[in-house]
Amino acid sequence: MDIIVCVKHVPETAEAEIKIDATGKAIEKTGLVFDINEWDDYALEEAVRIKEKSGGTVTAITVGPEDTDSTLRKCLARGADKAMRLTDPKFQGSDSYAIAKILQSTIKGLSFDLILTGALAGDDGYTMVGPILAELLGIQHATMVKKIEFDDGVAKVNRELEGGLEEKTEVKMPAVLSIQTGINEPRYVSIMGIRKAMKKEIKVLGLADIGLSESEVGETGSWIKVEKIFVPPAEKQAEFIKGSPEEVTTKIAEILKSRGLI
């Protein structure tokens, strides 16, 4: 089974101090550590497990500048057979729709049975690339996938729904599946895997190579344009009540009474 995994190179911001850059439309990336998007990490692991069980190949593809090679090298070290980087200055400012067009123009010329993406992008919180890519390719898709089984050209998947529920459905292959975290346990990268990955080629394609025009990518080819990023204003503040237990309970009672709650 030939599988394509779409991955994204994102900053790790959980414990970092985030600042907005001079444009007001992006965050300051200087000093931030970048790695593979968490949801894409699970998608890659699932692809490698399927390959190990059924045979075939795994190709990792990303859209981004040269420094995204570190994420592609990690994919190769973890079991991907090939890696492709789609890079062009004209791609700057592309939203999920434009990114999906870039991926579709590249993938349509490749042999594949399955395309896996992460269910969510950890940097912007969007979930659109997978479904849009499927629509552009004219194939079926499923999102928030927690389990995959195969049977005679059909992928049987469990999808995570709200309220702790799951849905079991079938999609005809080839298909696009957006993977949710928890579907597996991503493996560690071995030293031997890293050494092998450093020797493998990363194929680089630009705008001229994928058959799109300049007007179809970047901000011009996007549906969404970022106008401003800002820290939400603090509309309410927490009040810390100090004193003895009796004083604290009296104060709480007064607050509740003043607001008509008791």
Image (tube, helix red, strand yellow):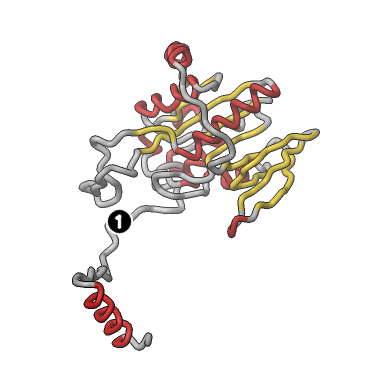
Who is closer to the viewer here, 109 or 166?
Answer: 166
Q: Position of residue 39 (x, y in %)?
A: 50, 40
Residue 51 % position (x, y): 64, 24
Q: In the figure, is residue 185 to the left or right of 112? A: left
- In the picture provided, is 134 more to the left or to the right than 86? right
**Label 1's element?**
loop
Q: Is residue 125 left or right of residue 31?
A: right
Q: Quadrant of the N terminus?
A: top right
Q: Quadrant of residue 183?
A: top right
Horizontal and vertical percent position of residue 151? 78, 35
Q: Quadrant of the C terminus?
A: bottom left
Displayed quadrant of residue 12: top left
Q: Is 115 positioned to the left or the right of 154 in the image?
A: left
Work out whether 78 lies above or below 127: above
Residue 224 appears in the picture as rendered: yes
Q: Position of residue 68 (x, y in %)?
A: 39, 29
- Amino acid carrying label 1: it is Lys
Residue occupying the point 64% across, 48% down: 159
Question: Which residue is the site of mark 1?
Answer: 228
25 or 192, nearer to the observer: 192
Q: Residue at x 19, y 71 (%)?
A: 243
